[in-house]
Image: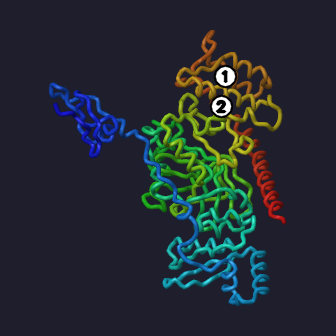
């Protein structure tokens, strides 16, 4: 009797006598998606179709290596030589050259190299904003190759981090007032291969929600038209359809006009992912969006000039219309991308990180009866992954450190925290206890708005019921919505305080950087 072996080329594994696929367990699944269903002994087709291959973890591309992402393809003059060449000074005069370079550096000017079609280099000096503008024009079709000149041979502490930045960011961030934020990070520009991961189907790959949030936290968004750039501190992801997210972006037509959408256009810098500002009743919201999700930036810092950080659902310091959005550049933090790929490979993942689960919930005001409301979908960059530096939500305000712990606002937030913990812990079996809500009510100001709203929540409990389910409970979610609205001004004031915390933290970084650079 001839022994049956696997039909996969090079595989010699023996097969069971009743094996009908012709492949061993190692090679069976990759072929099942391409073959028709097996037949039973009586010739009838089996009705069960293998869907597993379609839900397999996607291939995870690595970001380019450090060698690929650093510097230019040209052999250029060094920092000192480029400055002297731009001013038509001789490199032989050591004393004058040293003095001139010192003055240029003190003025904050930087050299760039203009390379013509014959590879001939000409140097210019300019302020970082002006150089950034030239780089932007080049991106829009200027027939010149403009790249930053190599840095000083002797690298001081202030410039030490720039070797980890793509050259496109060097000119923009050369004199950034928050340069210390980038000191220990590497960044790589988005590419189509990495973009494919941001377009995986969440219905088939639920863990890719966590990947998207983690990978985009700490990203840099650059408007090439103006040279403006922001660092994303915190971001919330929202799925495209109701099947994966009750809070998905609506696409209803209004009076015959299609609703605005963050859906990526057919043509943009990257395939099926871009950055775009969307107008809403709350203000202008900055999104990084793919075919699978839109990610709302809820905390950011301006990098090219000193501005107050943005915290909350709107972004004032960077506005990208459709034209600017198509051309905007996205740079991913290598650290965050690496952490995100571990989530992408873990089909059992249930959160972005295992601590501060309530901090991973989005700021929402409705759909409290839907499980997607309680799925961790918010991530912060490592530098701002601390509750004192993150935007407040209805789920987290109860533990906000500033002020007394029993204010009406914090008591209102306790109700949402109680509901969230119950759903995260018990899923479909989650209930909210009448005793817990009554305990919160007893601490509220009698006759106040919060007390009135909580009393209406207690009215949802029928008869002598001691608890009610949270999910699929339309009556409960209707009673919770007014309480969420009441919390809005509390959250706004808390975020104003957190903005000061962030500014203080950045100032402390700046002082430490300068003190460490002193001899």
Residue at the (33%, 38%) spot, across then down: 29
Query: In the drawing, does residue 194 fall left or right of residue 38?
Result: right
Residue extending farthest to the top is 464
Residue 200 in which image quadrant: top left
Residue at the (63%, 74%) spot, across then down: 150
Query: In the drawing, does residue 6 fall left or right of residue 149?
Result: left
- Which quarter of the image is occupied by the N terminus? top left
Residue 456 has which mark?
1
Q: How is the image coloured?
A: rainbow
Query: In the drawing, does residue 88 fall left or right of residue 369?
Result: right
Say which of 265 and 233 sits in front.
Answer: 233
Q: CA distance from mark 1 to mark 2?
A: 10 Å
Q: Secondary structure at mark 2?
A: helix
Say which of 238 and 68 sits in front.
Answer: 68
Residue 366 has which mark?
none
| Chain-order first, disc 1 or disc 2 | 1
Q: Taking the image as drawn, is residue 477 in sight? A: no
Task: Tell me whether the residue at label 1 lies in contact with that at label 2, contact meaning CB atoms closer than 8 angstroms.
Answer: yes
In the rendered view, would you say 128 is above or below 182?
below
């Amino acid at each position: 009797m001839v022994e049956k072996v696997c039909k996969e080329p090079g595989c010699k594994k023996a097969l069971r006598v009743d094996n009908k696929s012709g492949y061993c367990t190692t090679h069976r699944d990759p072929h099942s998606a391409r073959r028709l269903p097996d037949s039973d002994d009586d010739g009838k087709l089996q009705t069960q179709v293998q869907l597993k291959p379609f839900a397999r973890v996607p291939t995870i591309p690595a970001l380019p290596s450090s060698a690929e992402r650093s510097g230019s393809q040209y052999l250029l003059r060094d920092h000192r030589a480029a400055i002297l060449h731009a001013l038509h000074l001789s490199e032989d005069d050591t004393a004058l050259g040293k003095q001139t370079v010192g003055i240029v550096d003190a003025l904050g000017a930087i050299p760039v190299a203009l390379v013509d079609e014959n590879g001939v280099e000409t140097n210019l000096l300019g302020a970082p904003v002006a150089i950034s503008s030239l780089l932007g024009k080049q991106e829009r079709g200027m027939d010149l190759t403009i790249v930053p000149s190599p840095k000083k041979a002797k690298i001081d502490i202030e410039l030490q981090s720039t070797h980890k930045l793509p050259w496109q960011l060097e000119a923009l961030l050369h004199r950034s007032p928050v340069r210390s934020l980038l000191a220990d990070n590497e960044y790589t520009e988005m590419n189509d291969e990495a973009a494919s991961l941001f377009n995986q189907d969440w219905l088939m790959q639920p863990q890719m929600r966590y990947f998207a949030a983690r990978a985009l936290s700490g990203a840099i968004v650059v408007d090439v038209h103006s040279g403006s750039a922001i660092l994303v501190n915190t971001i919330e992801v929202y799925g495209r359809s109701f099947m994966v997210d009750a809070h998905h972006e609506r696409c209803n037509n209004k009076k015959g006009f299609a609703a605005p959408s963050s859906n990526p256009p057919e043509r943009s810098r990257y395939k099926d992912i871009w950055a775009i500002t969307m107008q809403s009743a709350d203000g202008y919201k900055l999104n990084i969006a793919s075919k699978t999700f839109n990610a709302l930036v809820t905390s950011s810092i301006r990098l090219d000039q000193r501005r107050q950080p943005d915290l909350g659902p709107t972004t004032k310091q960077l506005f990208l219309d459709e034209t600017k959005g198509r051309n905007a550049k996205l740079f991913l933090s290598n650290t965050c991308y690496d952490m995100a790929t571990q989530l992408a490979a873990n089909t059992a993942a249930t959160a972005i990180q295992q601590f501060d689960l309530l901090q991973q919930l989005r700021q929402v005001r409705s759909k409290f009866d839907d499980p997607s409301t309680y799925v961790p979908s918010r991530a912060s960059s490592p530098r701002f992954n601390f509750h004192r530096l993150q935007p407040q939500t209805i789920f987290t305000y109860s533990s906000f450190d500033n002020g007394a712990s029993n204010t009406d606002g914090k008591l209102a937030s306790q109700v949402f925290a109680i509901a969230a913990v119950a759903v995260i812990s018990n899923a479909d079996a989650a209930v909210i206890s009448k005793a817990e809500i009554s305990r919160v009510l007893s601490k509220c100001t009698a006759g106040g708005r919060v007390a009135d709203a909580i009393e209406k929540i207690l009215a949802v409990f029928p008869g002598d019921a001691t608890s009610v389910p949270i999910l699929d409970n339309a009556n409960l979610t209707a009673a919770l919505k007014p309480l969420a609205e009441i919390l809005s001004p509390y959250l706004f004031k808390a975020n104003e305080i957190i903005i000061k915390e962030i500014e203080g933290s950045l100032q402390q970084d700046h002082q430490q950087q300068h003190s460490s650079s002193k001899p």
